[in-house]
Amino acid sequence: MVTNLPVVGITLGDVAGIGPEVVVKALKHPEIYASCHPLVIGDARVFADPRFAAQHPQVWAVSDIVTAHFAPEALTVLDLQNLNPDEVTPGQLNVHSGRAAVEYVITAAELAQWGVLDAVATAPLNKAAIRLAGYEYLGHTEILADVTRCSRCTTMLATQGLRVTHVTRHVPFREIAAHLTVDSVLETIVLTDEGLRQLGYPAPRMAVAALNPHGGEGGLLGREELEVIAPAVAAAQAQGLAVVGPLPADSVFVAALRGDYDVVVCMYHDQGHIAVKTHGFDDSITITLGLPIVRTSADHGTAFDIAGQGVAHEGSMVAAILAAAQLARQKVGVARKP
């Protein structure tokens, strides 16, 4: 089958959470099949659950992409046969689902590196389950960086009208300042610029958020702005990048939403996440910049508190798959033969 549609691998995430539910719901949207060939990566037995069978009564379990026949009436699942659903209870931490979730991501990343997949869109992992399964990874970014041997990557969250990247991600709050260096801030600015150029921005306009209240008030409320962030911004400007800062975090997102900037470089996880999720929670996604493969993700967690109830919203997963397809088309640009 020759087609201009990219093949997007969709990992199920931790099946004790809402991953399978949002994937099944997302693949009921016709715009997905108009944009790509979606290949679910997981264990096909998961979809024997009546909750999912009611949504997608037909599942095509395949062992490789050559035998895949993508069509809206059925889920096409690359069946890893690595999880017994009877050993998993929705909403409960589980070593089996934690291990399987990591294996889904590793498989998808390898297939994308080999050119079998054009892009990867991931459903959420659970960090505690990953550790319970014996892995040291903190999340998707670390798994993908390890598999692709990428030493320079960062996470960008995006929703309509607002994009953010982060210098630090999964770091305890009291340790954030110690992890900020001129080099780490500069590298994030450079990676952000490179990533946005790959996404079609010819000269990204970047704002860098301050760490401390009111931008540090000239050192009265902290010296990170003076000693770390400002020197990094100056170094980026010396490289010709269109970047300003540090700007107070209580106003920089308003300016970005107004259209003054294409992206805000944030100092820590919640600084950027709160802004994006408040502005567009249901449709926000994650894009990993710097990887040799295209990877997007739903921008929410496993939501154990509502797992198994059928009430999870699939908007973020839909947006992640569509974004993966769009980025893949930009990268591939020609017909391919799966």
Image: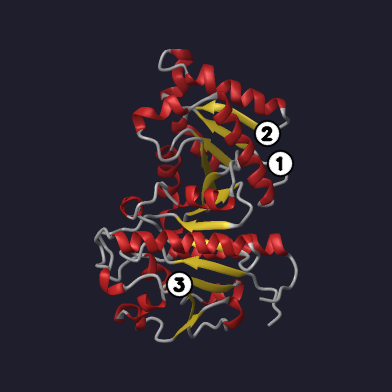
Q: Is residue 279 left or right of residue 335?
A: left
Please report contact status of discs 2 and 1: CB closer than 8 Å, yes or no.
Answer: yes
Q: Earlier in the sequence, mark 2 or mark 1?
A: 1
Q: What separation in Å lies between label 3 and label 1 (alpha carbons)?
A: 42 Å
Q: CA distance from mark 3 to mark 2?
A: 45 Å
Say if mark 3 contacts mark 2, CB within 8 Å. Answer: no
The residue most toward the front is 134
In the displayed structure image, the side of residue 114 where residue 88 appears, left or right: left
The N terminus, quarter of image = bottom right
Q: Secondary structure at mark 1?
A: loop
Q: Nearer the viewer, residue 207 or 101?
A: 101
Q: Are marks 3 and 1 in contact (CB under 8 Å)?
A: no
Which residue is disc 1 drawn over? 203
Residue 242 numbered tag: 2
Local secondary structure at mark 2: loop
| Of the two numbered discs 3 and 2 in the rendering, the one whose residue sits closer to the viewer | 3
For the C terminus, the image quarter is bottom right
Q: Position of residue 63 (x, y in %)?
A: 52, 78
- Residue at 44%, 64% (x, y): give it: 315
Q: Is residue 334 left or right of residue 284?
A: right
Q: Is residue 141 above or below residue 173?
A: below
Above or below, 288 relative to 212: below
Q: Position of residue 302 (x, y in %)?
A: 34, 58
Secondary element at tag 3: loop
Residue 28 appearing in the image: yes
Looking at the image, which residue is at 44% across and 40% down?
169
Mark 1 residue type: Ala
Q: Residues within 10 Å of mark 3 (few under 14, many from 20)?
A: some
Amino acid type, label 2: Ala
